[in-house]
Image (tube, rainbow, N blue to C red):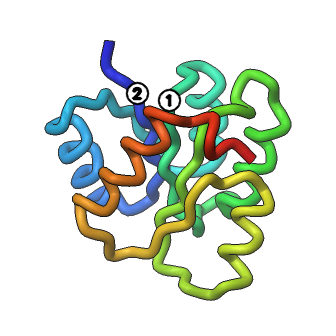
Amino acid sequence: MASKILIVEDNSDLSDLLSVYLRTVGYETSRAENSAQAIGKALAELPDLIITDLNLPDMTAVEAIAILKQDPATSSIPIVVLTAMAVGEWKAKALKAGAAEYLLKPISPHALMDVVRKLIEQPSLFER
């Protein structure tokens, strides 16, 4: 059974691109456009990994991460923040909330896959 990745991105073009790429290399994907959808899907589907944008229409990923990390059902799911926000303050907030990685857009597919594989194959090393 293929590992499942939840993509949380309000830019439909980027969401499509990430989903197609991840499916091409063998992962199942699910998508959400905002934090509320992401929390609901994470609880319902229990994905192996979540990749999320930082700035979402309803709340920041930092707030969503904190909610997911407080729930026993989703607390061990590794979360990657993929954002254009290079400000160190946001990175610190995301990591403190429980993100496993904070990556900057644009990112090469190979660099993203290195992180995805690392977190899916050895998630316990990156739990916060």
The residue type indicated by label 2 comes to Lys
Give me the residue at 28% from left, 51% from top. Answer: 18
Name the image quarter holding the N terminus: top left
Tell me the quarter of the picture where residue 38 sits.
top right
Disc 2 to disc 1, C-alpha distance: 5 Å
Give me the residue at 23% from left, 60% from top. Answer: 109
Please provide percent x and percent y for residue 55: 58, 68
Residue at image mark 1: 48
- Dot 2, how many residues are within 10 Å of its Cα: few (below 14), some (14-19), or many (20+)? many
- Dot 1, how many residues are within 10 Å of its Cα: few (below 14), some (14-19), or many (20+)? many
Q: Which mark is residue 110?
A: none
Number of marks: 2
Tell me the quarter of the picture where residue 90 sits.
bottom right
Please provide percent x and percent y for residue 64: 71, 50
- In the displayed orientation, state which residue is furthest to the bottom: 87
Query: Does label 2 or label 1 sit earlier along the sequence?
Result: 2
Please provide percent x and percent y for residue 41: 56, 29
Residue at image mark 2: 4
- In the displayed orientation, state which residue is furthest to the top: 1
Left-right relation of 119 to 106? right
- In the displayed orientation, state which residue is furthest to the right: 70
The residue type indicated by label 1 comes to Asp
Left-right relation of 30 to 61? left
SS state under label 2? strand
Left-right relation of 1 to 119? left
Q: Evaluate if marks 2 and 1 touch, with contact meaning CB atoms under 8 Å apart.
A: yes
- In the displayed orientation, state which residue is furthest to the left: 24
Residues 43 and 107: in front is 107
Give me the residue at 25% from left, 68% from top. Answer: 108
SS state under label 1? loop
Give me the residue at 65% from left, 58% from top. Answer: 61
Please provide percent x and percent y for residue 96: 79, 62
